[in-house]
Image: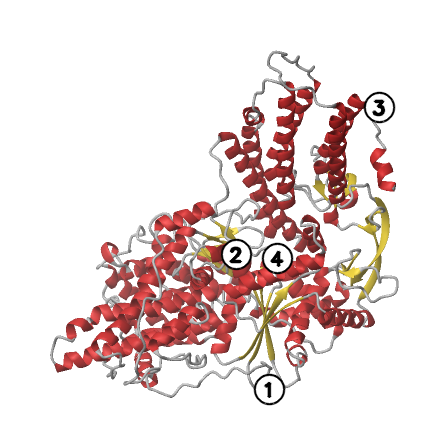
Amino acid sequence: MIIYTNEGNPLGLQLLMLAKFAKRTAQVQLVNLNDAKYKDLLVLPTMELDNGLRLFSGAAIAKYFLGDESQQRDEWLEWSTTLLAPALAHHMAVGHRADPNALPVLNNLVKKLDDHLKNSSYLAGDKVTAADIAVWSLLAPDGTLKGAQNVDNLRSWYGKIKALSEVQQVLGEQSLKDLSFNALQQANRYGGLHHVPLKRSISTDAGKLLAETASTVADTITDEEISAARAAFIYNKPQEFAEPRTVLPKAGERNVLITSALPYVNNVPHLGNIIGCVLSADIFARYSRAAGYNTLLICGTDEYGTATENKALAENMTPREICDKYFELHNSIYRWFGIGFDYFGRTTTQEQTDIVQEAFKDVYNAGYILTESVEQLLCQKCDRFLADRFVEGTCPHPGCGYEDARGDQCDKCGKLVNATELVRPRCKVCNTAPVLRSSEQLFLDLPKAEPQLREWVDRVENGWTHNARVITRAWLREGLKPRCITRDLKWGIPVPHKNFEKKVFYVWFDAPFGYVSMTKRYTKDYEQWWRPDANTDVQLFQFMAKDNVPFHSVVWPSVLLAVNKGNTLVSHIMATEYLNYEDGKFSKSRGIGVFGNDAQETGIPADVWRFYLASARPEGQDSSFSWNDLAARNNSELLNNLGNFVNRALVFCEKNFSSTVPHVVLAQDEVVLLALINRELRGYINSMEKAKLRDGIRHLLAISRHGNGYMQTQQPWVLLKGNADQKTHAATIIGLCINIACLLANLLFPYMPSTARQLFAQLNAKQTPLKADKPLTTLLLPAGHKIGKPSPLFSKLEQQFINELKAKYGGVQDTQTATSQQSNVADLEAAVQAQADQVRQLKASTKDKTVWQPEVSKLLELKKQLEAAQKTATTATPAAAVAAAIPQKSTQSSSVQDLEKMVQAQGEKVRQLKSSTKDKAVWQPEVNVLLDLKKQLEAAKAEPPAPRAAATSTQAAPDAATQVKDLEDKITKQGEKVRTLKASGDATIWKPEVDILLNLKKELSSLTGAPVAGAQGKNKKKK
């Protein structure tokens, strides 16, 4: 279920607590009611159940979670909603919404609470009910009860509720200091609760129980926080990082093994791929090392399978050559992004083969392998069974009839297709018709592994992201089914089993073992990580996009549980949603979106990309890359906030204190600042421990904002002109700000390592370990420390520059109406295909309609838009463009020659487009141009020869023998061209060339008088 709420809404806290007490899992999704996507939400928070039903009444949600507890409970729920919540909203408001008359009303309500709790442990009896949760969540935001007097019963009750384990778990996810009644203004369409009138007729003789509303966040600091901040701010010589040559787990210490989902080797990773796994894993690994944990980060390229064979065919290379090419491309991109893998490997190694084959034998011997017969298409010419992507044919679905449907789906109607159901199927390699044959395959017996898998999931899933839990539970809810682990391919790891030696393992059986084999390439002691001793605990964090979850949460764990050799199993699955590009999809073929190699070419530093992608990381829902957002975050958060603060502090120290850190004398303002920073530091540590990278950035930037505000308020440049005490205080300000800058460098390092190193150099300092168990600010740079030379860390991204990049990576646009319509159709067809892929993945992973129905609705809407765009585009035809492109010649021969050249050039253009993309919307318009050119060429050839004007002809007719020889040469070259193209297997490419060859032969026949020899080419080939 999902709780839709807005940031800081205390009512959202109430729903989260109710779910926790009911032991139900709920995903919190922060939304904005002004966003068109959420126009159907009327009020926040709203809870959406798994069946799609939405509840927004707090009382109704309480009853849903906890049932009918008592009538007294219901009365208190009504009281909290209609009286307490409006009174608090009026009282805690700021600016013109502040209501000076609210405090007396609120005092009376608080007195009623205190009086009731004098004789009752809880609001509705002797145990906690939904009433206690509702009222407590309203009083919980910082500042609500601050300064309250004569409410000892209320304070005692408040403390008891807060101490409950369920409440503490919620507070670990939702900090009280982030809650504000001002957030209610954005919680409905009516400006919050200010439209609800206060019951002023209520007696107001309660006295002054509550203090006036706190004016600043500093007023919420407690005495305990002040004492802790003052005590911690001392200098202790920091430990230096000593990274061993080979990282191994140690008994009694925290050992963190981190993997990033293995990227497919057959493509160029785009920004969504990068933040979805490798960059997220790197940021977390850098934090983990900084926290002093034994940390190993492993990744590499996934190189086996059909996708690689397809790419090899497209680029006329062998699978090994494709893997070598793209491995280096991936490796170079990740190095540029500063990804600090301990080892980046490949699945095409002997270690991988040995480990996978051994694992299979273990699973087989344990009794978890089944043999089943599967009907597949066999290409007799290629002598192999065809994987789905190697079969094309006519779509079998009624009303479609698309001739180029693939063996897994039809791109025209978007429906799933079984390869064996295609009408007139053909092999994609050789273009011949395959035959249906039975093929024996090996299956993993997942049903047999299911009981122990369920037990394991129950034990560990609390460490997983919400989407990982939902996807896994959907699989388990339906019951697991045997899963095929072998394929009739050549490119893969051979199956070491009798009668299966010519088959290979399905890529998703072998790929997860890549983590193990790559660790083995890193160290011969790899089993210390993957089969640790009983007294050594290894936590496995796996980063991926949500589409990879089932293989890491169901399939691979089932294999390892079946093997039962003490293998390390994943404890934390960190799955992201999808990153879109400017609210659309990334498309390499259409030049839409930023890919890894593109980011390098922009001139924007890699660290800025890292920062932005982490800020936009799709943690709870899909997010979008936006050029304007990138510029805004760089200019406001990096340049004006973080960069401005550290540069001002360092320059001021250089110019006024000879680059020497002055002595810090803590007064009240400084200790309050340290206490505020400690709050953010604690939030940073808590966020990073859970790999909530966006929240980590938010806390980091809050620290620099506190520093900026402190410096601006204290104005040391003014104090330096005053008396001795004022100058001493100015020195304290700068000494403290320099230390805050050093803290920021440490916190920034996981996100922006190169920038952090620059800042350390300017501070003349080194990275120091983060104390995750004691998140308190210490004196990092003592008085007398000499800093380095300050310089700006960031540069402004100008809007003109951003506009240029946005245009460059927004796809190639043509100003002509017809072309723009075709581009629109192409974009929509790509969007339909991408959405259809997502729907198929969801449907394959679960039968739960509430999971995939929203995506189906999106798909249907996209199809409607596509249909409308196609109707509009049908009026545009490339014929006009063809006609305009054909020069008008005075003679038939010159016209034919020109047309032949144009046909050849257009044919080459079509071939290049087809080799670069399978997206028919990209190359079909060019095919239409080619076909029109060929029609005009045929018409030109069919016209009778124009009579020559003797008066203007000064050249003798060419020698017939020369013409014959030229034609024979042309036929030979064209025949060779046809044979080469036929080897590629795509009939749409080579059939037009066959027509040209036949026309050449007819022309030769007309010159020589000999009949056309249709078998001539074959006879030559036999020789």
Q: Nearer the viewer, mark 2 or mark 4?
A: 2
Q: Image height check: is 863 above or below 549?
A: above
Q: Secondary structure at mark 4?
A: helix
| Scheme by which the image is coloured | secondary structure
Q: Position of residue 627 (x, y in %)?
A: 42, 51
Q: Nearer the viewer, mark 4 or mark 3?
A: 3
Q: Earlier in the sequence, mark 2 or mark 3?
A: 2
Q: Evaluate if marks 3 and 1 touch, with contact meaning CB atoms under 8 Å apart.
A: no
Is residue 914 found left or right of 371 in the rendered image?
Answer: left
Can you identify the residue that label 1 sits on?
Answer: 251
Separation (CA) of disc 2 from disc 1: 42 Å
Q: Amino acid at mark 3?
A: Ala
Q: Earlier in the sequence, mark 2 or mark 4?
A: 4
Q: Earlier in the sequence, mark 4 or mark 1?
A: 1
Q: Quadrant of the N terminus?
A: bottom right
Separation (CA) of disc 3 from disc 1: 89 Å
Can you identify the residue that label 2 sits on?
Answer: 597
Can you identify the residue that label 3 sits on?
Answer: 1010
Separation (CA) of disc 4 from disc 1: 35 Å
In the drawing, what numbered circle is on residue 547?
Answer: 4
Q: Image height check: is 381 above or below 273?
A: above
Residue at the image position 62 percent from the left and 35 percent from the top? 905
Label 3 environment density (alpha carbons within 10 Å; few <14, some 14–19, many ≥20): few
Q: Earlier in the sequence, mark 4 or mark 3?
A: 4
Q: Position of residue 48 (x, y in %)?
A: 52, 54
Q: Secondary structure at mark 3?
A: loop
